[in-house]
Amino acid sequence: MNDVMIEITDLTKSFGENQVLKGVNLRVNRGETVVVMGRSGCGKSVLLKHIIGLMKPDAGRIVVDGIEVTALGGEELIEFRKRFGMLFQGSALFDSLSVWENVGLGLLEHTDLSEEQVRRIAREKLELVGLSQVDDLRPSELSGGMKKRVGLARAIAMDPPVILYDEPTTGLDPIMADVINQLIRRLQATLQITSIAVTHDMNSAMKIGDRLAMLYGGRIVFEGTPEEVKATDNEVVRQFVEGRAEGPIPIYEE
Amino acid sequence: MNLVGYIGKSVSYSVAEVGAVFILLCVAVKRIPKAVRQKHLVVEQMLKMGVGSIPLVLVTSVFTGGVAAVQAAYQFQNYVPLRYLGSVIGKSVVIELGPVLTALVVGGRVGASIAAELGTMKVTEQIDALETLAIDPIRYLVTPRLIAGVIMLPIITIFADFIAIMGGYIVALVGLGINTHVYFTSLKLFLGGLDIFSGLIKAVFFGIIIAMMGSHHGLKTDGGAEGVGLATTRAVVSSCLLVLITDYVLASLLFRGVFAG
């Protein structure tokens, strides 16, 4: 099982004068987890939003499971998104809905399951991320770590083949961050999900990634396994991994 | 910046804006068949718009009717007998004051809340989250608000008309010494079905305007808390302006075109 699930070719995107992505190439195999590392504001989230079709590229192609995302529009695009789960940086829970409704919204909208059945599935997914007795709470009553876990439960609610993680551990304490890392690892092991995670948390990147890719200056400048990343003499990667202010990466982007 | 450039930019911005709202309206209308299947979303918005606005509309209408009575009585002095007071209040309330003041008050309240809610959802990525769940935000968020606006505004307007006429009645009875029979006889004397119909037609348009301005400015919010504030202001200002402009256009069409023959 080494076929390509996601293939990104020469992806470019500008916002006004600012060219954020300058030709990104990336392949993700089925069942694999690839972590895209990079500094804040280097276009990691933009890359994710292109994969799921929330943004349209200026040029380039993205093919997911044989379907060209960039060519889709309207209803087709909405249908296509059912293959994905996405965990957002700020969790992005719907604050007008209760926790179980957040998790079950996709099921309530797209299936004929009864409210009771959806509630049961939502509860199962919540247990999978280690939460119980929170079904009827509002997102505003949850802590940051709990919100992330509810977001994760929502992302896996429809059993999608692909999950995208946008900064899964940002803003969490180190212990909760590790809990999330383990959850992500476990979901991959048990559910055989293909994932892309973007993060600048090196600890998390090393733990959850089968392969790591470094996004720098609008391109992928390095790809390799966690061991290869540790062993590399690529100066950009070294500086990032070791978290040094001195090195080839300018502190202020032009 | 030079003047020509500035004017050019403003004009192209305005045209783009009108286009964007029109497209949003078209898509929202196209999604109506799907949206009505989820009655709970529509009902929720109807309750928010309607029930929540009652106290505000009640106060506005009582005083509108009252002031209409006082002002009309002053204008009538020595020219028109006071027994025609009911007709003037009835006509002005049903055709003009009821629908327009209701739309302005509800536009301020509901338009702002729609823009703030959708704007917050936009900046906290909840709109993106909806899309990743394969839920069309226009179908899920905009269409229910549009339907609620179109249904609720006429209903609130009828309520406002009634309260304003009663407000006028109280002033007439207590302050001007006009008795009940005289007031309601003159009210019925000139008030026709067309007057009421024209007021309700206006209310339908105002409902569309309020829902669309709130949704449009909410959905295109960016830039965090400040952006949400800006979107809210824009939604209220633009819906109030559009209500007044549409009122004039509809009045011209209805009373100089359709009804005039």
Image (spheres, coloured by chain):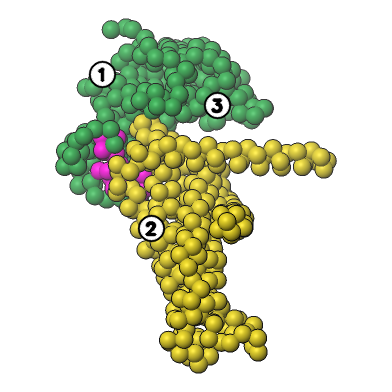
Chain colours: A green, B yellow
Task: Return the chain for callout 3.
Answer: A
Between B30 and B234, the one lying in front of the other is B30
Mark 1 or 3: in front is 1
Residue at image position (53%, 90%) is B176
Q: Nearer the viewer, residue A34 or B1?
A: B1
Q: Do the CB atoms of the residues marked 1 and 3 lie less than 8 Å apart?
A: no
Q: Residues within 10 Å of mark 3 (few under 14, many from 20)?
A: some
Circles 2 and 1, Cβ within 8 Å, touching? The answer is: no
Q: Earlier in the sequence, mark 1 or mark 3?
A: 3
Q: Is residue B123 above or below residue A235?
A: below
Q: Secondary structure at mark 1?
A: loop
C-alpha separation, residue under disc 2 versus residue under disc 1: 44 Å
Position of A227 relative to A43 (above/below): above
Q: Identify the residue at horizontal 59%, vertical 81% (top origin).
A: B72
Tell me what residue is drawn at x 43 percent, y 87 percent: B180
The reply to whether the magenta stretch includes residue A97 is: yes
Disc 1 crowd rating (10 Å Cα; few below 14, some 14-19, many 20+) is some
Amino acid at circle 3: Cys
Q: Which residue is mark 1?
A: A192
Q: Residue furthest top?
A: A2
Magenta residue span: A90-108
On the rendered structure, is B2 left or right of A241? Answer: right
- 2 or 1: mark nearer the eye: 2
Query: Which residue is labeled 3 in the image?
Result: A42
Location of mark 2 (residue): B48
| Residue A218 can be seen in this image | no
